[in-house]
Amino acid sequence: MLHREIETMKREELERIQEKKLKRLVRYCYQKIPFYRKLFKENNVEPDDIKRLEDLSKLPFTVKDHLRENYPFGMLAVDMKEVVRVHASSGTTGKPTVVAYTQNDIEWWSNLMARCLATAGATKDDIMHVAYGYGLFTGGLGFHYGGEKLGLTVVPSSVGNTKRQIMLIKDFGATILACTPSYALYISEVAKKEGLDPSSDFKLRLGFFGAEPWSESMRKKIEESLGLKAIDIYGMSELCGPGVSVECEHQNGLHIWEDSFIVEVIDPETGEVLDEGEKGELVFTTLDKEAMPLIRYRTRDISVVTKEECECGRTHARMLRVQGRSDDMLKIRGVNVFPSQIEHVLMGIEGVGESYLIVVDRDILDKLTVKVEMSEKFFNNKKNDVDILKKKIEEELNSALGIKVEVELAEPNTLPRFEGKAKRIVDLRKEKGIF
């Protein structure tokens, strides 16, 4: 198995590797990146203060605003002539966050992605249909290079033109699908409209889904509709792209490649480092990046980390499915609500379709409305009872969230579809300037 020796080494040996790399990284960042040199001095920290892994907490956090303030290349540790590729976020909320790669970085990232694919069971016999976006977004090229490194046959389809994608998946005999979970459901939906049964007409056996939070209920729905095993994969462009962690065949958390990353979990409000097993915000330190290394980068992703050895024999820490982002969390009448909680409830109710929309507004008090499509099977059933379905959804959401939720049912295929990352939240409070 690819990298099996590294993935199963004793934790003491793994932590020795991390400690050695951490000390090298801190000195490298201090010497090469003016931003970090200034940040260290402002926090009265010097490279020599970092002698053990436990000393990591002495270092300040890096946040997304730091990257934006140093746009485009102020975070580089190398000369621009050593940069062979640049990726960037969409920049829809301001300046994009730019990520640069040396040739060594590309090789490192490709190896991480190959390791992820192999961990879930991909082999050289597989044909992988990549329906993540290519371009400045890291998803498409991350899977592409990782697949080629492992020896898979890669179909670089990117996003859009869904009917053509379905034709290629069927005609090329793709065995692996890589895309966002919301797009996977959309592919299944369109295929059925074209008269196909994806679970029998396609040869898909594995799916790698990420780039947006998704629930166990959605996993089950994807697996049933496409006839494959749905694998959760995690990453973000600032760290490398996809490839930071992935599920193995036991699907009991995502293995974090700790020889390349140090992971911490903090209280998102106070920044305090939490104990193993406590839920909080993930913080990553990159140990092998050359062009743009990051120290204690706050991801805003909420999860739980355990260091217990997995059934598969891997000893690297595992993170549970990301439950949401602290900056996507909705505060409704004093209650914290994650969109993934709503999705989990909806996907488990018979009669609910493929799409939904969360709308938050405020008059005197906050108001949470969830617009939900009915499934075609339910909608076309002469015995359907819309009022009963609406009441059931409201009761289950109210129970799960602890607040009153209003549900609006919509006809099939009337709510927005997403070929990339799903945008399911409309917060009218922000538009009104209430926040």
Image (cartoon, rainbow, N blue to C red):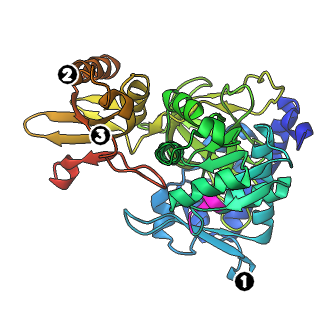
Q: Is 214 included in the stretch rendered in magenta?
A: no
What's the amino acid at mark 2?
A: Asp
- Give the vertical position of 201 relative to 114 (above or below): above
Could you tell me which secondary element the residue under label 2 belongs to? helix
Q: Mark 1 or mark 2: which comes first in sequence?
A: 1
> Would residue 185 appear left or right of 376 to someone viewing this image?
right
Q: Quickly name the residue at label 3.
A: 358
Measured from the top left, where is residue 391 in percent x and y?
23, 19
Residue at image point 63% right, 62% down: 157
Q: Residue furthest left?
A: 364
> In this view of the protein, can residue 435 be seen by the observer?
no
Q: Mark 1 or mark 3: which comes first in sequence?
A: 1
- Asked where in the image residue 384 lies, by quadrant, the reply is top left
**CB within 8 Å, label 1 to label 3:** no
Quadrant (top left, top right, bottom left, bottom right) of the N terminus: top right
What's the amino acid at mark 3?
A: Ile
Q: Residues within 10 Å of mark 3 (few under 14, many from 20)?
A: some
Range shown magenta: 136-140
Q: Quickly name the residue at label 1.
A: 81
